[in-house]
Image: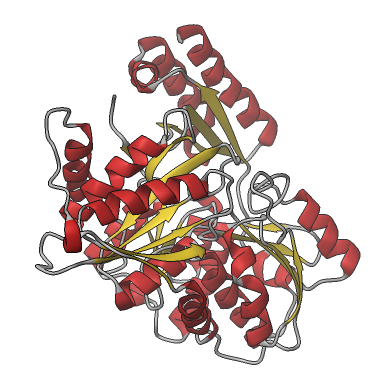
Amino acid sequence: MGRLFGTDGVRGIAGDNLTGALAFRVGQASAMILTEATHRKAAFLIGKDTRVSSDMLEAALVAGVTSMGADAHILGVAPTPAVAFLTKAHFDAGIVISASHNPHEHNGIKLFSSEGFKLSDALEHQIEELILSENLRLPQQTGARIGRVFYDGEGLLDEYIDHVARSSEGDLSGLRVAVDCANGAAAATARQLFARLGVQHEIFFDKPDGVNINDNCGSTHLSVLQGIVTQGGFDLGLAFDGDADRCLAVDERGGVIDGDRIMAVCGLEEMRAGRLARDTIVGTVMSNLGFHRYCKQQGMRVISAAVGDRYVLEEMQKGGYTLGGEQSGHLIFLRHATTGDGQLTAVQLLNVLARRGIRASKITDCIQQYPQVLVGVTVAGNDIKKRLMEDASVLREIREVEALLGEEGRVLVRPSGTEALVRVMVEGREEGLIRGAAQRIVDAMERTK
């Protein structure tokens, strides 16, 4: 078995390479590593999204955690950022069972420290070593030292909803919003949150059945929400992903407001209020050139981290910055949260719209984005990813494409940290040119696989 942890925890196909047995072992190893400094019976908070496999994995994780002597507090269906926030407030560690924006057959396990942050690479490595050690028997507890299981989700979720609602700074009652819950974790909180905010709202895709999570809905499938917004006369559409740590928006004309644009709009508002630390936003290498140029024009600096919210957070903590995120809508408002939070992002965007009193399209149209083409090349495993990234013919094709685009474009080729893909991104002023350029690189990879 290879490395278990990717850029967002342990991921796999539930029942295939992500089994109950593996989840049990993750629970055991996590309890041993994350609670060894407590010197008492530690407490884990465990939340999940709405996938049919989440119950199975939850049961296995609970068994693993309690077998090591830690208590398990079951939150039930809840957004990932709710687990992070509540763990920081009350618990020694947190676990989320989710595969985020992926289809229902996928699932994953994310771990949070007592501070509400995702684990460092070093801690994940320690846990992974325990899981993969075939000859090491973990010291399971017996008798009264075995952990207990507690079910206290409803009150805790109310606490999280209150926290997000308190980040609203103005009167939102003049806005009418369509909310897409992706048939995922936001279905457990969005209705109560938007009612508490006082915003006029209609909730869509909040009827999960175990297999319809992210199914033609949510932040990765915006076309239905675009139709809802334009036909229904809404001021804004908001779309979350399966575990509600991402948010993308749709303006009143149906135009997509991606994470770059949300960061730029919210960052400018934060800077004007004197709350944007060092007038800096942390983006990623995927952030659009248009986003960079807009921020520079407005007097904001952009720092580019590697793709993945954990790397964005590392840059934010290292430099003392307060806002960062990804084009995908995974934004971190460090004044309010320790991880990406889709519903918190939605509230911050609504605050800007209410304060400025103008249409969403008017705010975001001034951020002229360059066309981007993103293509995923499917691979059989991590060894193929590595080979493609090092192959001479692929590297030659990339250099030729970069020369063709010149200073008005760029190429980024990277292996996915969560899926069996190598992603090819090409950006430039002319869409036809960049599509052809991306295809050249994809073709070179296909020949090499």
Q: Is residue 378 left or right of residue 45?
A: right
The residue depicted at 52 percent of the width and 22 percent of the height is 378
147 w.r.t. 97: above or below:
below
Q: Is residue 259 left or right of residue 402?
A: right
Viewer can see residue 332:
no
Image location (x, y in percent) of residue 7 = 36, 43
Q: In this view, does 265 lie to the left or right of 128?
A: right
Image location (x, y in percent) of residue 237 = 73, 65
Viewer can see residue 330:
yes
Which of the 4 quarters of the picture holds residue 360?
bottom right
Q: Which of 136 and 410 is in front in this view?
A: 136
Q: Quick one: quadrant of the N terminus?
A: top left
107 w.r.t. 281: above or below:
above
245 w.r.t. 176: above or below:
above
The residue depicted at 73 percent of the width and 45 percent of the height is 216
The residue depicted at 46 percent of the width and 17 percent of the height is 397
- Most extreme residue toward the front is 143
Q: Nearer the viewer, residue 428 or 100?
A: 100
Q: Nearer the viewer, residue 259 or 116?
A: 116
Which of the 4 quarters of the picture holds residue 239?
bottom right
